[in-house]
Image (spheres, rainbow, N blue to C red):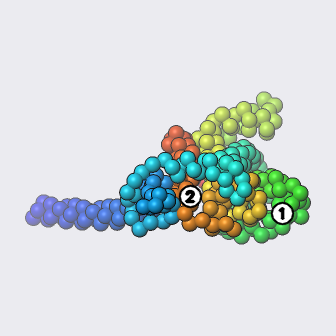
Amino acid sequence: MSTTGNKKKYKSQSRNRRVSLGVTYTILTVLSIIWIIPLVWIVLSAFRCEYQPDGTFIGRVTSNFFPRAYGLKNFKDLFTATYYGVPGAFPRWMLNTLMIAVIDCIISTFLVLSVAYCMSKLKFKMRKPFMNISMIIGLFPGFMSMIAIYFLLKSIGLTGNPSHPEYSVIGLILAYSAGAGLGFQIAKGFFDVIPNALVESAKLDGCTSFKIFRRIILPLAKPIIIYQALMSFTGPWMDFIFAKVIIGADNAPYWTVSVGLYSLLFGTHPDTNLFTQFAAGCVIVAIPIVTLFMFLQQYYVEGVTAGAVKG
């Protein structure tokens, strides 16, 4: 009787587990389809090449999900057209974004890793209060400081400067990188894994803190360096709010790609017939990020897992 009862109990548990897994996978499948549909629509719209009977190109949103004709016209027009009086505007916006993202990546990664090293390996009086304060500040979204940052930059001429509109790019880089050090928690968790004995031994040999950081900590922290660099790069690459506010609506030559694409449809001179070019721009912007994640996925997972678990 006992054996029979155990078998029934096992079968019941197994059946309940299968039902639970079936429901879970069904829900996840439905959510995945809902999430993927807009992405597929954007990609299809980017390659849509339809014309009216009179030969006019249809670039606006249409009711049909699948295009009746495909082509590369939207991509060609995007790279050659003049927007807001800027010839070859989209390539220039891409270069602006790339420059800002690379510079911010270098500065922010160095600041984050430096602060993480100090919080992990150095002992000083205000260490714990500083960590608590940084955690509290991190609870608030960054755009809450947008107005204050704008007026601070404006007071020193780094935004809203009609005689030197290029200074707004410097102001945007400062806005991205100045407070990056507060996001040290994951990197600190990774540095906590590195044995303190290595640091103490180096100090006995006469190494300074910076030399320990440069020659011992960083060579052992490749996953977290790649993770932090990737995060620092993708932030400016995809950001819209800070770029829109700090660069301004009248500095089209210095726009980032997100501001430029937005302005095609919702700027001071919107054109609904540019939607397919907007979709083509979205596809192009996504390519670098997807490529980076594909090639750096292993290091990204190692960095965020080790840092998050230890932290």
- Residue drawn at (71%, 45%), measured in percent from left and top? 99
Q: Which mark is residue 278?
A: 2
Q: Amino acid at mark 1?
A: Gly
Residue 40's place in the image compared with 202, above or below, is: below
User: Does residue 85 appear to the left or right of 11 in the view shown?
Assistant: right
Residue 300's place in the image compared with 134, above or below, is: above
User: Does residue 1 appear to the left or right of 174 in the view shown?
Assistant: left
- Residue drawn at (68%, 37%), measured in percent from left and top? 218
- Of 54 and 59, nearer the camera is 54
- Residue drawn at (83%, 60%), measured in percent from left and top? 159
The secondary structure type at the circle numbered 2 is: helix
Looking at the image, do the residues carrying marks 2 and 1 touch, with CB atoms under 8 Å apart? Answer: no
Q: In which quadrant is the N terminus drawn? A: bottom left
Q: Which residue is mark 1?
A: 160
| Precedes in sequence: disc 2 or disc 1 | 1
**How dense is the environment of label 2, judged by Cα within 10 Å: few (below 14), some, or many (20 and up)?**
many
- Of 65 and 15, nearer the camera is 65
Q: Quadrant of residue 296?
A: top right
